[in-house]
């Protein structure tokens, strides 16, 4: 495993980080729970393979991610960095910062968090932080040993990054989206590094959209590959302005494949970058519906599994797997949990669009997607 300096924090973190948003789950009594028989040993295996940066958040995996991450890694707590986030909508008055932090610490069964993020902030949130002097609460919690570093995650327009970094003194690292499909934050990641912030990125394989087989890797390297995610990860890790690529890994097999790629992470050569430009036309079709599967749009009040339907569409539109998805879609509509809702059940409330970090017109896209799936 390779390690990189994380800004001016003094930490050196693994170039591959573990994003704990997609831990394996099971259903029980019509609810989803983390499958601890799979998740717990997988997290420990990640540590054994050299990963030392683990990222979670209060709502991940139906609010079970923090506790699973903390318990799985408790025996090696002093050898790793734990990251989580404060949902800023929960901050209403002085003291709420500490309250949310303590809630997360209790779930993770730890006395401190290494990197605590203002979660998904924008210009308005930055103003809120300053107006309420939340950084004074940050300093107080740091002095008491509850947190080591204050950070922020980001889903807004790229130009807002500079506003946040310059406007909120004391921020130490940034977490934002960056991959072959979405390079919009590239310049701001460079700016963040220049300002001394650690730089971590989420969605290095586009929420899994770059995982299934295509001819892209062969076009770029002349070598056979089972999946485009190899070049996608190498592209992200090859950016000298990025310290860590967070991957939401669901199986030990996926973990071990990604670690092998991270072990040889380095800058992509000029020739490979030229080939990448030639192959971008193929990558462009992935942008047709840029859903990363983050599930922030869920739960849907009408019971529609929006990410699942969008995933079906991607496999039809991008990978040409219509026959296989035809059966999966039929099963989805008749599955034993009594779900299977489609656009026909949409109540047009717009709740999903208010929560989507990609600012997708979800209702419009959902109508189009379901029409395609119905006509398979």
Image (cartoon, rainbow, N blue to C red):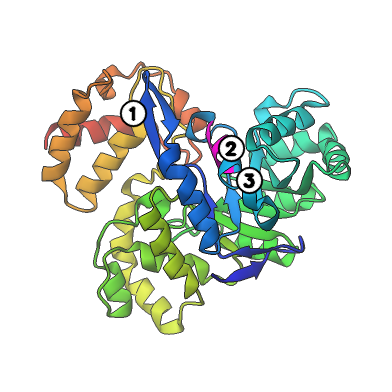
User: From the viewer's perspective, is 68 left or right of 370?
Assistant: right
Query: Quadrant of the image for the N terminus?
Result: bottom right
Q: Picture coordinates of residue 217 (x, y %)?
A: 31, 70
Answer left or right for 164 relative to 361.
right
Can you give x and y, in whole percent of width and height, for residue 263 in the image?
48, 72
Crowding near the residue tagged with mark 2, few <14, some 14–19, many ≥20 C-alpha atoms within 10 Å = many
Q: Residue at x 74, y 32 (%)?
A: 102
Q: In which quadrant of the rendered view does residue 89 lie?
A: top right
Which residue does the numbered mark 2 point to in the structure image? 66
- Residue linked to disc 3: 74
Vertical comparison of 199 with 90: above or below? below
Q: How many marks?
A: 3
Q: Nearer the viewer, residue 45 or 178?
A: 45
Against 311, residue 81 (above or below) is: below
Secondary structure character of the magenta stretch overall: helix
How crowded pointer 1 is (Cα within 10 Å; few <14, some 14-19, many 20+) is rated as some
Quarter of the C terminus within the rendering: top left
Q: Nearer the viewer, mark 1 or mark 3?
A: 3
Q: Position of residue 174 (x, y in %)?
A: 66, 53
């Amino acid at each position: 495993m390779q390690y990189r300096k994380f800004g001016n924090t003094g930490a050196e973190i693994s170039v591959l980080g573990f994003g704990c948003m997609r831990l394996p789950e099971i259903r029980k009594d019509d609810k989803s729970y983390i499958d601890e028989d799979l998740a717990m040993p997988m997290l420990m295996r990640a540590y054994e393979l050299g990963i030392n940066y683990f990222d979670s958040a209060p709502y991940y995996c139906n609010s079970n991610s923090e506790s699973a991450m903390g318990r799985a890694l408790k025996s090696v707590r002093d050898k790793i960095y734990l990251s989580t986030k404060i949902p800023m909508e929960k901050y209403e008055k002085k003291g709420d910062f500490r309250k949310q932090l303590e809630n997360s610490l209790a779930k993770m069964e730890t006395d401190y968090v290494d990197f605590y993020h203002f979660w998904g902030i924008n210009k308005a949130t930055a103003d809120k932080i300053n107006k309420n002097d939340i950084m004074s609460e940050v300093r107080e919690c740091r002095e008491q040993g509850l947190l080591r570093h204050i950070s922020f995650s980001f889903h807004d327009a790229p130009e807002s990054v500079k506003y946040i970094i310059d406007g909120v003194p004391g921020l130490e690292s940034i977490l934002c989206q960056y991959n072959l499909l979405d390079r919009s934050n590239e310049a701001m990641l460079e700016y963040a590094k220049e300002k001394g912030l650690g730089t971590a990125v989420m969605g290095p394989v586009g929420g899994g959209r770059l995982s299934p087989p295509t001819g892209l890797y062969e076009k770029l390297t002349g070598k056979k590959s089972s999946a485009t995610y190899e070049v996608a990860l190498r592209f992200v890790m090859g950016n000298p302005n990025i310290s860590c690529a967070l991957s939401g890994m669901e199986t030990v097999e996926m973990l071990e494949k990604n670690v092998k790629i991270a072990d040889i992470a380095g800058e992509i050569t000029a020739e490979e970058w030229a080939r990448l430009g030639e192959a971008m036309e193929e990558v462009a079709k992935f942008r047709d519906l840029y859903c990363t599967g983050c599930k922030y749009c869920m739960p849907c009040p009408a019971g529609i599994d929006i990410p699942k339907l969008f995933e079906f569409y991607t496999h039809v539109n991008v990978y040409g797997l219509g026959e296989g998805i035809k059966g999966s879609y039929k099963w989805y509509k008749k599955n034993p949990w009594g779900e299977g809702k489609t656009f026909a059940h949409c109540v047009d409330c717009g709740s999903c669009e208010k929560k989507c970090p990609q600012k997708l017109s979800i209702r419009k896209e959902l109508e189009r997607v379901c029409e395609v799936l119905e006509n398979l």
